[in-house]
Image (cartoon, grey):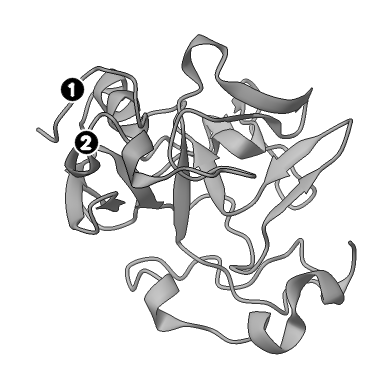
Amino acid sequence: MQGRDAYLPAVAARSLSALICPSDGQQPLDPYSLPANEFPTSNYSSVMGPGRDGQVAGADSEQCGRYATDGVIYPKSKTQIAHIRDGTTNTLLVGERINELRVWTKGAAIDSSKACVYQSKNVRWSMNQDINDLCYRGTYRTCPSGSTSLKFNDAEFGSRHPGGAHFALADGSVQFVSGSIELTILQNLATRAGGELATLP
């Protein structure tokens, strides 16, 4: 579905303070929405997982890549509490983001050629990567020469406030995760049943 009907305009046009981090505000509107820059974005996305051992789905397009299915929330997920075998206190559910934000009601665009997921993200990169070094080559961004191309589904988690970012865990609690956390540990926390028994440092 295309156009403003895809975003439930009467709802999507509302700015909800609970979905916006006060320390950000640098991309308050979605430039990719139709009409452009009419709908407010969200700083929070669900965690699809790291996509280990081939636990990914969707067409691997150059723009978006594939999406992980080893986390809790991903397209067509039917995850239940019993499926979170790593423990709900050790599994990331939703996290803060500041890079490539979209309108908060937008879900995913999936067909035989692409799988672009808007409000859920893979955990492929460390938090707070420099967006000039790890750059999404979208319509509204010019990337520096030599920067690494960021696939849309892999847009990293992070924040503009010092020290790290907030994540909601599968047990309903919210924890502040240090921005210096090792990527491997962050990915361990992003799986629902990886058996890594990772805990927040």
Percent position of residue 42, x then y? 51, 66
Outermost residue toward the left in this view: 201
Give the quadrant of the C terminus: top left
The reply to whether dot 1 and dot 2 touch (C-beta < 8 Å) is: yes
40 horizontally vs 22: left or right: right
Question: Horizontally, is 57 left or right of 86 in the view?
Answer: right
Instruction: Say left or right for 5 vs 46.
Output: right
Question: Which residue in the protein does label 2 denote?
Answer: 87
Give the residue displayed 54% in from the left and 30% down from the top. Answer: 69
> Residue at horizontal 40%, vertical 66%?
24
Q: Quadrant of residue 192?
A: top left
- Is residue 158 in view from this perspective? no
Reading the image, the residue beneath label 1 is 197
Amino acid marked by disc 1 = Leu
Label 2 is placed on what type of residue? Gly
The quadrant the N terminus occupies is: bottom right
State how far apart marks 1 and 2 are (Cα): 8 Å
